[in-house]
Image (cartoon, rainbow, N blue to C red):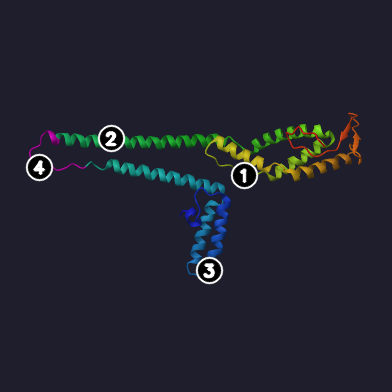
Amino acid sequence: MNPYEVLQVDAAADQEAIDAAYKRLARKYHPDRNSDASSTEKMQQLNVAYGMVRNPDRRRQYDLDCRADARRARREQRERKSEVPAPQPKLTGRPGLISQMLKTGGTVVATLAVALGVYLWREDQVADEQQARVEAELADLSTDSLFDKELDAYLRSCMAAAAQQNPAVAEPYCQCLIGSLRAKFDNSRIYAPSESEFMNVFKARFVSAAPDDPARERCWSRGQHEARSSSRIPTAGHAIDPAAGSALRIGRPPAPGSTDTTP
């Protein structure tokens, strides 16, 4: 069974497209809605197909098995072709130079066919080895470790920008942003053909999870509230930092990496 054909989606479709296709077809063929005698069998096929591709690990294994089966079928087809003897035309009359040339030509064709088969077999071997190396390289990559590294850089950038605006609010503000980013980040496994593609997908996920303007506004207000609660900022517009003894302004929240300090 080809689950992609049953679900009527392309083999490269993302998970959202597969889920949507399954829901659409399930509504169409569910026995409670469709009185056709074949609806029960069709619904069973949909459930089996969806079960094969709804889990990322099972889907990846199915795709790898399909590619391996396709390579094996091509290899067997080439081997069968190479085993077929070259046709020899029937000549009338006394054997001579032409007959000898035709016999030699048939041998050359057979030799070329064998050589081509060996070459294509080696190409498949090289492709399998390259795929194995890529999978070994990607096995060392972890979204958890990369996320922690990016999160640390994000926190340092946030603290630097917020400290220029209001040192008393910087720490609770940035910790609030970090919590928001952690909650939104998609930490599911990344399937990519190369390390560069893996990093592109990871960076896109990180940028997508970064807090937007409303989230930074909420975190800034929360940071001000926590700073006032800890007696670092009074309710009025200015405050004296007991440690530094400097006046601190209460301004708008800066974005991490920004150098804008305008209140």
Secondary structure under the numbered disc 2 in the rendered image: helix
Q: Amino acid at mark 3?
A: Asn
Mark seen at residue 188? 1
Mark seen at residue 34? 3
Q: Amino acid at mark 1?
A: Ser
Q: Residues within 10 Å of mark 1 (few under 14, many from 20)?
A: few
Q: Are marks 1 and 2 in contact (CB under 8 Å)?
A: no
Instruction: Find the residue positioned furthest to the left.
Output: 94
Q: Position of residue 168 (x, y in %)?
A: 85, 35
Q: Residues within 10 Å of mark 3 (few under 14, many from 20)?
A: few
Looking at the image, which residue is at 52% across and 46% down? 60
Secondary structure under the numbered disc 1 in the rendered image: loop
Q: Which residue is mark 4?
A: 92
Numbered disc total:
4
Judge from the rendering whether residue 24 lies leftward or rightward of residue 248; answer left or right. left
123 or 239: which is nearer to us? 239
Q: Which residue is mark 2?
A: 112
Mark 3–mark 2 Cα distance, whole angstroms, equals: 59 Å
Mark 3–mark 4 Cα distance, whole angstroms, equals: 71 Å
Looking at the image, which residue is at 16% across and 42% down? 89
Question: Picture quarter containing residue 167?
Answer: top right
